[in-house]
Structure formats: structure tokens, C-alpha cells
Amino acid sequence: MAFVNREAEIQFLLDRTESNRAELIIIYGRRRIGKTELLREAFKKKNAIFFVADLGADQDQRRRFSEAVGLLFPSPLLQTETPPEWEPLLKYVIDLAKKERVVLILDEFPYLCSSQPALPSILQRIWDETGKDSRLYLILCGSFVSFMEREILGHKSPLYGRRTGQLLVQPLSINTLKGFYPGYSPEDRISAYAILGGVPAYLIQFSDKLSLAQNIEKQILNPTAFLYDEVRFILMEELRDPKLYLSILQSIAFGSTRLNDIVQRTGIERGPVSKYLSVLQDLRLIERETPATEKHPEKSRKGIYRLSDNFFRFWFRFVLPYRSRLAESGGRRIMEQEILPHLDNFIGQVFDKICAEILRYLVDVGRIKLDYDTAGRWWNGNEEIDLVAMAGDTPVFAAESKWSKKAVGVDVLKNLERKVSLVATEGNANKIRLGLFSRSGFNKEVEELGRKREIELIDVRKIEL
């Protein structure tokens, strides 16, 4: 499959090659997000020293690093049986960079720091002495987000203040899925996104030559498939005690979204649960969500926890509970009995987040004229609005999103109009624009209001996502 999207990230990386000065770029993001592929794509036409660290001993890392450098810049220094320490190796690369632009990529940098904890300090000293005055383009890349933010970008890091740029690689957005599944309808792409999220390593597992049900059965429910045990492998790789985290994630996936609910469902004490939730937030696996209108969300008592990764939601909802049955009888029966009857409801639960992405896309391409900063759900007690867009502290747009096989009727619109008064600031209710997102279109009365431009009607089947 061709490399999809990431044009802005690639341009950012390539622009720095033309700066004619020393560059120290930090790239980080959760596992499977496509950092390594991004770097390979960006520098495929450049002579870059590309070194991917592993969990090996320091001497093995240095040997492999010497080999990677030697592929482009042969030297007796790099051909010794026991490679020298990191300092002369790095100084050799910097000496080269005094004469020409040298791109050095250290991928999985946290692994290097694990085998040689002094490496950030060594890099800092060499950078300050000679690196900053060379033409070295150094990229440090890592998947341990909390490590990269704390130990590399944090103010206590030896490298603090040396970076010339940083890039947090995010999941792909909904509007990139046409590149993965050109043969799917917009409705099927939204469904695939609700199941897999925006992680490229997951998206490439599905094929638009197969139906969604066939893809799920073949690529998720099959015990030999990459995605079948992916969540468990990620947690075992990232965490010391994955069983407790599995329990917490599963409780959130089944609707225990508040701290007290998670404590009761898992049986884990409140203190440890708070710590585990913080770790899962650092890993970008969960997020703490507050109503869109909250002025100080970090202090809000209305916060709830939500799985931020769509595939994790799917796995905890439809794979983990049925693992023993899948191993015994395969995926066909689980698909027919446990997944298909509930799939629309599952997609509907994340459709509001997808509509927030669709809104941003439509604004960016000029289909909707709206100036706003953030967008998200709003709730207060039993009242809820699927999407509220905020300009500063002021709500400017409110919408409902319906993943239903029925056309949206005027009853939904009237209910939205009633609820808008609950979020409006003083004198602002009539200025909040209204919208409806629908999987199945709108009835004639609602369509007439849309033609009069009294409301934004977004039929997701008609958007080339």
C-alpha cells in the first residue's frame, strides 16, 4: 500500500534539511502510529544515517550504530571489533557534519537510554561543544511518550533547551481513509474508522476488497491475525503489571467512566486506580473528557474517562470477552451472534467524536464557514449535546449526530433548540448556529430548513472522506 497522508509532517522534516544550520528535532508518539515509516518516507531520497535501537546491551547497540554510519561514511574507527564509546562515535559524525549536511536518525531512542542512561548527558555535552555549530540534522525518535516528554523535552532533561523543533505524531484523521479504502463508501469508511481508529498499522490490516464483516472476522477475530492479540501485546510491552491495566480499560470500555465507578467495578483501591489512569493517559490510550463549555477542564468535577483509541474500544468490547469461544469455534459465530447485532450501537457511541473531526474537515475545506477553537460533547445531568464548538469561552455551534438507519426528523432539531439555551452565554442563544449530522439523511421538513440555511445539514454519505 502506498504511504498515506502525513504531508505536513513530511514537509516539516524536509524544510529543516534546507536550514543550513544544526537541527535537533524530537519526534514522538504512541506505538504503531507510523513514526518510523514517516521518517523513512521523508528521507527516502536523502542520504540519512538511520539507526533503530533495540533492547540489546550497550556494546551491541554501539556495534550496530557503527555499522549504520559505516554504510554511508566508511572509516577505520567504525571497523574495530569492539566499537568505541558513544562520545567518539558521535564526535565522528559531527566532524562529518562540519563539512556537509548529515542527517542522523536515532529511532527508538528510549531503548538507547535504557542500555546507556548517560547518553542524553553525553549528547548534551557534545552538542554544546561542537554540534550546535555544525550542519548536523539530528532526530531523536521514541514511542514511550511519557519518557520523551519527561526525559528528553522536560526541563530537568540534559537536552532541555537544545531542541530546534518537535513533532508529536498523532493518529490519522477520518478524512484520510479514502487513501486506505478507495473502494469503500463514506459510510463504510466511517465504520472502519470507528473500529480501527487512525493508527496506520491497524488501518492497513483491512482491505476494501472485503466487507467490514469479512475484515473483522479475518483480521481481528482470527487467533493468528495481527490484531487479535495486539492490545495485550501493547500493554505487556509498555507496562509492568498489564493485568490491572486490562481490568481498568475493560471497565471503561463497558461504561464505567468515572473514578468511583472504575474502583467499584475493578475492585482496585482508589489511590492505585488514579495512578494507573494517569499512566494510561500518558500512553494516549485514554483521555479525560469534560463538557465542552468548561472553562477550567483540569479542575472540573464533571470529568469522565474514555478510551481514546477506537480499536482498543472494539477489542475490549468484542474480542476479550469471547477469547475462549474464538479459540474453540472461530469467529463466524461470534461475528453473527455478538458483533453484528450490536455494531451500529458501538459505532454510534463514537460517532460524536467522528463528527467533531468531520466538522473540522468541512471548515478547513471551506464547506462550512465557522470560526472556532475547540469542539466536543456537552452534558449536565441528564441533558447532553453531541457536539458543541467553542470560540474562546463562547459556544458558537451546536449539533446532534445520529448513526441511525432512519432519516433525522424535526423532533431531533426541536430537542437540540431546547438544549442550546442550556449552554448559551447571556444573550448568545440566538447566535449559536445549529447542525445535524446523519448517517441516513433527513426528512423533508428538516431538508427545507437546511435549504433556507437555518441549519447545517451534514449527510455523511455525501462527504468524500
Image (tube, rainbow, N blue to C red):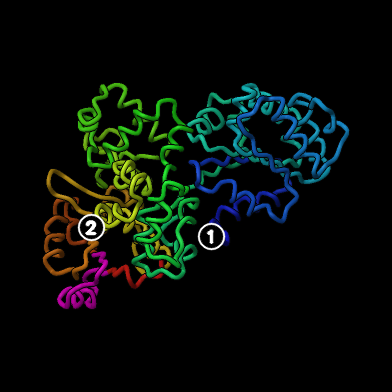
> Residue 8 vs residue 14: left or right?
left
The residue tagged 2 is 341
- Residue nearer the viewer, 386 or 394: 386
In this orientation, which residue lies closer to the viewer: 150 or 253? 253
Amino acid bearing label 2:
Pro
Q: Which residue is mark 1?
A: 4
The residue at 62%/41% (across/down) is 25
Within-10-Å neighbours for mark 1: few <14, some 14–19, many 20+: some
Q: Is residue 349 above or below residue 306?
A: below
Q: Position of residue 402 (x, y in %)?
A: 22, 62
Q: Secondary structure at mark 1?
A: loop
Residue kind at label 1, given as amino acid type: Val
Q: Quadrant of residue 267?
A: top left
Question: Residue visible at 38% across and 48% down?
Answer: 311
Q: Position of residue 340 (x, y in %)?
A: 27, 58
Quadrant position of residue 133: top right
Q: Nearer the viewer, mark 1 or mark 2?
A: 2
Residue 455, disc: none
Residue at figure coordinates x 25%, y 38% from the top left = 304
Q: Position of residue 459 (x, y in %)?
A: 29, 70
Note whether residue 460 is visible: yes
Magenta segment includes 455: yes
Q: Which residues are magenta?
A: 436-457
Q: Name the spot of residue 24 as percent of width and height, x first.
A: 65, 39
Q: Secondary structure at mark 2?
A: helix
Q: Residue furthest right?
A: 76
Badge 2 local density, few (<14 within 10 Å), some, or many (20+)?
few
Q: Is residue 29 left or right of residue 320?
A: right
| Nearer to us in this view, 261 or 431 | 261
